[in-house]
Image (cartoon, grey):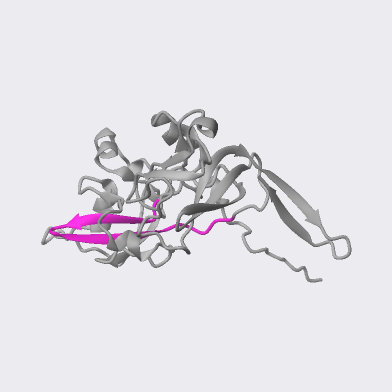
Amino acid sequence: MYSLLFIKQGDKVALCANLPAKHFLRKGATYQLLGGNGKPELHDDPSSWTLSADFKSLEIESSSPLYSKLCEVDSNTGDCTLPSKVVLDTNLVYDDVAKLGGDEYAVDTIRTVKMKVGSTFIWYEYVRQPCVEHSFYRDAKKLTISQIKKDKVEKANMCGNPLSEIATPMCAPAGWETTSRDGRIFCNYQGERMTYDSASAICQANGMEQAYPQRIKEWACGPCCDGLVSPQWWKDDERFRSWSNSDCGLRVKVELSSGQVAIVHSP
């Protein structure tokens, strides 16, 4: 007698929403060398983010435990060897001094990191471990997908898992629905994404709340817009996702004849 074992794609793989905090600083985290060009290979970042000095990068200081791992000093010369691939062999420990020395401990996830070696800037890209996203999850929140086009911000909405690092904060003063239509984005580096709770904490720290206003007044990571004026660096095909403070409904649509299931987002 033979038995067949069917393994679905994603079986025995961690849920993305269940990855441990600071997973990019834990044992097994992988980084690949980009060299002097900060444009990532595995993340879809616009070229303007790395070619313009106006955009904030996640720079790690020489005192950082992560810097030490990426540098990998040659014991004979004392110079950084800069391996093409680095896999952390232990969880990095950040004391109070190290936590204050760089932004990498303040974020939920990393895309690329920038480090100064001598007089040169070197970049590494974080390669997140494989993980699975559930199609249905609890306590969904509304995500606003924005696209700046000429003189206005075009928007669409969908649901997002609040435990996943998938969107940026969008903050506005209390009462923004009637008194202010301007939103502000605060972040540690251009393209930063975070969980819903982290986004809410950033808004609260700046005396604001999560919102979904009609305009973007300030982008704290780079040049942005004044009211509805489209920034020169933003292309029409570039979009970003931001958290809102609204709940979102996930529903199931079933085709009776075939039994096929579709997901309906009801923000």
All told, the count of numbered labels is: 0
Q: In this view, does 230 lie above or below 246?
A: below
| Residue 265 x %, y % | 68, 50
Give residue 232's position: percent from left, percent from top: 35, 59
* Residue lying farthest to the left in this orientation: 77
Q: Is residue 22 above or below residue 39?
A: above
Q: In which quarter of the image is the C terminus?
A: top right
Q: Percent position (x, y) of residue 260?
A: 80, 62
Q: Is residue 149 magenta?
A: no
Q: In this view, does 111 lie to the left or right of 139?
A: left
> Residue placed at 63% from the left, 58% from the top?
11
Place of residue 161 in the rendered image (x, y in percent of width and height, measured from the top left): 59, 46
The image quadrant that residue 256 belongs to is: bottom right
Location of residue 138 by image quarter: top right
In the rendered structure, the answer to whether residue 223 lies left or right of residue 158 reads left
Magenta range is: 110-132
Q: Which residue is drawn at 34% across and 42% down?
A: 105
- In-front residue for pair 74/9: 9
Residue 113 visible here: yes
The chief SS type of the magenta part is: strand
Q: In the image as oriented, which residue stretches furthest toward the front?
A: 151
The answer to whether residue 198 of the structure is visible from this angle is no
Residue 114 shown in magenta = yes
- The residue closer to the viewer here, 146 or 92, is 146
| 5 w.r.t. 210: above or below | below
Screen quadrant of the N terminus: bottom right
